[in-house]
Image: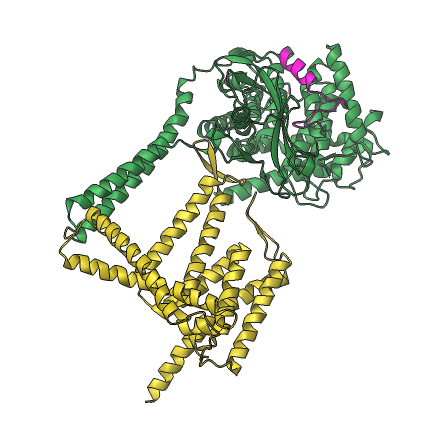
Chain colours: A green, B yellow
Amino acid sequence: MKKNKILSLASICLVFVFLFSIPCLADTNTSRAEAADIPQDILASQGVFGKNAFQSFVDGFLTENAGIGAEFYILALAHDETLDFSSYEEALLTYLKNNKVSSASSRLKYALCLSAIGSTDSYILQTIEDSIGKQGLMSFIFGLHLLNNGYQNGEWTASIVKEKLLSLQHKDGGFSVSGEYSDVDATAMTVQALAPYYKKDADVAISVENALAFLSARQSENGDFSSYGVPNPESTAQVMIALSALGIDSETDGRFIKNGNTLWDGILKYRLPSGDFCHTEGGDANEVATVQVFLAATAYLHMQNGEDSVYLFDRANPENAELPQEKDNTAEQPETKGLNIKAIICLAVVLTGGIVCLVLFICKKRNPKNFLAVLIVTALIVCAVLMIDFQSVDDYYNGADAVKENPIGTVTMEIRCDTVAGREKHIPENGVILTETSFVIEEGDTVYQILTEAAKKYQIQIENNGTAKMAYISGIAYLYEFDFGDLSGWQYSVNGERPSVSAGAYVLKDGDTVVWEYTLDLGKGE
Amino acid sequence: MKSISAYNPIVICIYYLSAAGILMFSQNPILLLFGAIGAIAHFLLRNGQKNARSHLYFFLIFIVLGLVNPLVSHNGKTVLFVINDAPITLEATVYGFVSAGILVTVFYLFRTFTDIMTRDKLLYVFGRFSPKVALVLSMGLRYVPLFRERAKKITETQKALGLYKDDNIFDKLRCDLRVFSILITWALENGITTADSMEARAYGTGKRTYYSRFRFGTSDILLLCVIILCTGMTALGLAWGALDFAFYPMLTFTESTPLGIASYLSYGILMMIPIFAETGEKLKWQYLRSKI
């Protein structure tokens, strides 16, 4: 098994050494003209190697890593119509069957891979129906890629998702996964999804131009981009894919040439002598960096040949896609799982009781009342276990919305800790734990209920020292009361006012704005 | 080297204060490991195979206290599973077991401490500062073995009276409850008698003097120096944060520095002192016997 892994790793390394060595052997500071040749050299080296090398790469490494890292290779290689992906398809479907993918964006990414290789499995339409919009920006981006390829199911259509994406743009033209600070990767990926409408839709054209202005401003003197303050090739590769999808040649567009350095200059800085790429300059080879540059090179080649965005797939087969089965059995699954754990624990308790009885018997304490006592204790523990509700981590933090039968409106909630932002490693630097997010409420929903919902959906840790009705929130996101002095702790406000009741007793109405804040002085300072 | 109980009571007191003090103020799993090994090994060396019941109780306390913390505190990034909408985390569990371990280790330390510090030794140490404290301490520490003995007496008397012949859990519980009630009555009555008796002997009317046969010899000074050196080193490491261990939000050790390693080592040495002393004594005894 291990040997196989090493062999397959060695084989990708080999592929990449040959892919990138020919154009890049001479020197790292490849001039612009040479950089433009890279994708063509990739094609050339494909010819040199013959198709077998790629086919064995698909059947070997990618099939073995289906679901755990092969996906972006598949998106890039799916455009090669000579390749056969059946072994990978089978492996990915097996992976998806055996693993419950908790993240909506990851589910959409897998669905996109399936559509890229021409699969007709029901997973694609199923995912479109239940995952778009379930995890913020990224789930809209991957969802739009799928819809762009012609798939359609459920309430979401391409134009709705497109409008939704446009509404998420920040004032500076950028986008972000969460918070109000625009991020290069998120912006570039949004542009990739919007690219097919760039020339048809005036709104999209304006939005994309703003996003490009934002990206142009963020490019460094070396031609590369930074994500969260760290210059890296992945962000640069994402910008390259975005520009190529729009049909812009980054080598000639003045907005993306800084100090004479283009995007390719920015990317090639990170190339290692072995041919793969590192995440930070001087670092070790990084698989994510390598695969994203690979996809960027493919996208650039598409642009040069005047082809469509790299996210539009020829193999995509929306007409024949299977409709998902009614998902009765999927809903029942978690319950049976919880039952299994309970059954195991109960069995263990009963067995222990039996062993104690046996010991009593052997020790000649054979009075029937002894056995009666053991029986009572065992029964009590079993009752307690049956009353407890066990859930696995994936089931609890499944990223899904709570089911509301009779919604009466929406409220927004925000969790901030500006007072102590960045004071410790685990506290976010911008002070935002949950950006302003809207939640659907039912009659009688309290602030505490919405907080628990947010905690489940966005995986925020919360600590309640009271009951559901008399909630007392002592900690959110590992930040606790008294962590910063005797007067520090969490406070909530609704529409700017601080109610003097527990968060578990305050009933929300439509349009309320809830803000949780960390105070250092019992809230007197604000 | 002689057995630790043969040293001057002041040295013994300082030793146990520093061993338990560092443990209680540190919350560090490695210090706890050294402390637990030292304290339990010393207890076993002194008492041998006896006290199986104490070990069982201490173990139960350790398990129960360790498991209660994750049910009450939900801090920590590594969620193991979720019970009734409350995430159970690895960090809270580890914190629970480390705290429980510290408590049980301190129990073991004090078991040997009360064993070694007989009443005359306690009076010798505390009689100088305050005779009242010394008396209260000595009387208080006396109560545990005294009550155990009395409980045994009461049970035997009850049995002799012909009650509780049935050998089952319910009857045993009922018996224990009755014995307990008799014990409390006896203790309250006894307290009044003791007070009366002391007053009759004019306790607290004037200055008291003590006779003590303890000397502060060279070996005491030597041991005291070693104890102070080890404690000082560990305290220095604690004060400089070299022994810091963060439980939340993720279990993280401070990177090991020379100071940190020196502190760990010196606490390890501190906890091994009684074991060396005890084994040294035993070897010497065996050697002398072999010459007869």
Residue A410, placed above or below residue B241: above
Q: Which residues are magenta?
A: A160-180
Horizontal relation, residue B218 to residue A44: left or right: left
Q: Where residue A201 appears, x then y in whole percent? A: 73, 10
Q: Which residue shows up at 17% across the image and 44% down it?
A: A369
- Of A454 and A283, nearer the camera is A454
Main SS of the magenta segment? Answer: loop
Q: Which residue shows up at 83% across the image and 26% down it?
A: A255
- Of A335 and A314, nearer the camera is A335
Q: Where residue A188 appears, x then y in whole percent? A: 71, 25
Quadrant of residue A293 in the image?
top right
Q: Confirm whether residue B118 shows in the render.
A: no
Horizontal relation, residue B196 to residue A162: left or right: left
Q: Which residue shows up at 29% across the image and 55% down it?
A: B185
Asked if residue A174 lies in the magenta stretch, the reply is yes
Residue B194, placed above or below residue A494: below
User: Which residue of the protein is positioned furthest toward the bottom in this rendering?
Assistant: B292
Q: Confirm whether residue A436 shows in the render.
A: yes
Q: Which residue shows up at 48% across the image and 30% down it?
A: A396
Horizontal relation, residue B121 to residue B261: left or right: left
Quadrant of residue B46 in the image?
bottom left
